[in-house]
Structures are given as structure tokens and as C-alpha cells.
Amino acid sequence: MFDLLKVALLSVAPISELRLAIPLGIKYGYSAIEMFLFCTSLNILVIPPLFFLLDTALKWAMRFSFVRLYVDRVMKKIGPYVEKYGLLYLTLYVAIPLPFSGAYTGTIIAYVLGVRKKPAFLAISLGVVIAGILVTFFSKIIIEHFKTFGFVVFIALMLLIGMALFFWRRESGVSIS
């Protein structure tokens, strides 16, 4: 029971979301389908309250320069893609199973860019489902093939991919977001 609470908290926490919760739940012995449904549902349930909180919290937070810089960066880097490709880009952005590309970031992007809430909710939810499918699939394969170290291997691979993308983006000057 305590293990399921840890999985639930990871599912609704920013940054980790279902990307860490699903493999952890599978490691604890829950089935992959159970973890996909549980973690994906919890991650989607975060979106509506976040939209509501952003109405007041972002207005308050914009007083701080680092928040304004972050919002400006999002507008410059991601805004043109959302304007060009619409909700498809938002869905694909959220579907990438890497930290800082989940439901929280997708909701913030949609809010800052003024995307209507209902279509944004549907696009972000679809992205969460796609990310959940990918994470569940790869978690199951890695944990099955590396019984003892499967979870550690999965987390190490996620970190390596994230670091590789970070350094590639930094050195080439290309925006991947």
C-alpha cells in the first residue's frame, strides 16, 4: 500500500510525472497495465487544477525576473511551433518521455500561449497517454530483460538520453523544444 502511495505521488509530481512512476510501480510488482492506467489517469488529473492555479499563480509569479525570463523563453522557442503546427505540436511535445516535457510543462505552454483550455486539455491528455504507452513499453522490456538492475538501467538510460539531448542542443545551437 505504501508503495502505491509513492507511485501516486511520483505520478502527480512535476518533472517525474509518469516517467518515473510507471517503472517504479512495475518494479514494485504491479502489472504494467495497472501502472499505465493508474499513473496516466493521475497525471491527466493534474491538468485542470493546474490551469486554474495558473490564472492566479502566474500573474503573481511574473513579478519575479526569473519567471518572466522563463515565460519569454517559452514564448520565443516553443510559441512559433505551436502557432505553426497547433495542438499537434503540443501533443507531441508532451508525448516525449523526458523530464520537463510532460503535463505540467504542456499546460504552462498552453496557458502562456493563450491556447483555449478544452482543446489544450485534450491535446495534453493525448500526449500523456502516448508518453505513458512509451514508458510502459520500454519499462516492461528493460525490467523483464534485466531483472536485477532493470529499474536502474531504465533511469540511467533516461538520464543519458536527457543529457545527450541537452549537450547536443547546447553545442549545435539547435532548439529541440
Image (cartoon, rainbow, N blue to C red):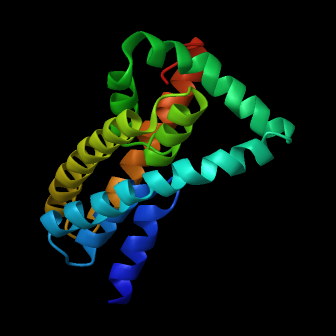
Quarter holding residue 84: top left
Q: Residue at x 44, y 66 (%)?
A: 10
Query: Residue 88's spot in the image, x, y percent?
Result: 32, 23
Quick one: quadrant of the N terminus?
bottom left
Query: Residue 33's spot in the image, x, y percent?
Result: 13, 64
Q: Residue at x 43, y 44 (%)?
A: 102
View extreme (bottom): residue: 1
Note whether residue 96 is visible: no
Q: Residue at x 86, y 41 (%)?
A: 63
How many numbered discs, if any?
Answer: 0
Q: Residue at x 25, y 47 (%)?
A: 129
Quarter holding residue 85: top left
- 126 lies left or right of 161: left
Query: Which is more toward the observer, 64 or 146?
Result: 64
Compared with residue 86, is residue 107 higher up or lower down, i.e. above or below?
A: below
Note whether residue 120 is visible: yes
- 121 lies left or right of 28: right
Query: Residue 94's spot in the image, x, y percent?
Result: 39, 37
- 93 lies left or right of 22: right
Quarter holding residue 117: top left
Query: Residue 36's spot in the image, x, y percent?
Result: 22, 60
